[in-house]
Image: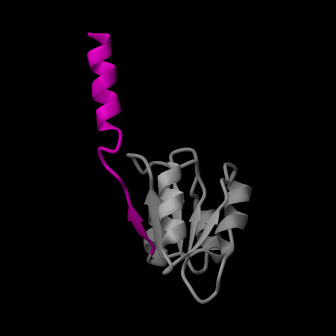
């Protein structure tokens, strides 16, 4: 999807629920870039012009990735846990990290009940 210099660009670099993509695409405050990037080199190239990054556990958001993103202001981790994000590098750059704790709580509960 098109990127724009006049609006903040949100990069969705992971497989996410189609509802999220549809919702953000309708929001006129943002330009949206849907570009699943699974390797560090792909992600480093994709983040160069984004202001916000939506990621999941399989995206390695390394110091190199964060340094490549001169406009990056926020990283939203679409799963619980932040182990795949270089938090110190983000903090040094003033990038906010938002996690979604408990995002998979229902699935875990269902699995536990299923094993009982």
Q: Nearer the viewer, residue 17 or 9?
A: 17
Residue displayed at 60% across by 74% down: 50
Q: In terms of image quadrants, where is residue 103?
A: top left
Compared across the picture, whether 105 is left or right of 5 comes to left
Q: Nearer the viewer, residue 93 or 1?
A: 1
Report if residue 14 lies within the magenta region: no
Tell me if residue 47 comes above or below residue 93 in the rendering.
above
Compared across the picture, whether 102 is left or right of 32 comes to left
Q: In terms of image quadrants, where is residue 107?
A: top left
Q: Nearer the viewer, residue 40 or 18?
A: 18
Report if residue 105 lies within the magenta region: yes
Q: Write down the region rendered in magenta.
A: 95-116
Residue displayed at 67% across by 49% down: 38
- x and y percent of residue 9 in the render? 57, 76
Residue displayed at 43% across by 71% down: 91
- x and y percent of residue 16 in the render? 53, 49
Tell me if residue 108 comes above or below residue 61 in the rendering.
above
Residue 89 appears in the rendering: no
Residue 106 appears in the rendering: yes
Tell me if residue 97 comes above or below residue 57 in the rendering.
below
């Amino acid at each position: 999807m098109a990127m724009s210099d006049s609006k903040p660009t949100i990069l969705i670099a992971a497989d996410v629920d189609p509802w999220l993509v549809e919702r953000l695409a309708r929001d006129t405050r943002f330009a949206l870039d849907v570009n699943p990037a699974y390797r560090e080199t792909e992600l480093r190239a994709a983040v160069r012009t984004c202001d916000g990054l939506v990621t999941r556990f399989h995206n390695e958001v390394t110091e190199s990735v964060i340094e490549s993103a001169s406009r990056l202001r926020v990283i939203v981790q679409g799963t619980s846990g932040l182990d795949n994000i270089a938090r110190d590098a983000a903090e040094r750059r003033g990038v906010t990290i938002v996690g979604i704790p408990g995002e998979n709580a229902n699935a875990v509960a269902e699995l536990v009940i299923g094993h009982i």
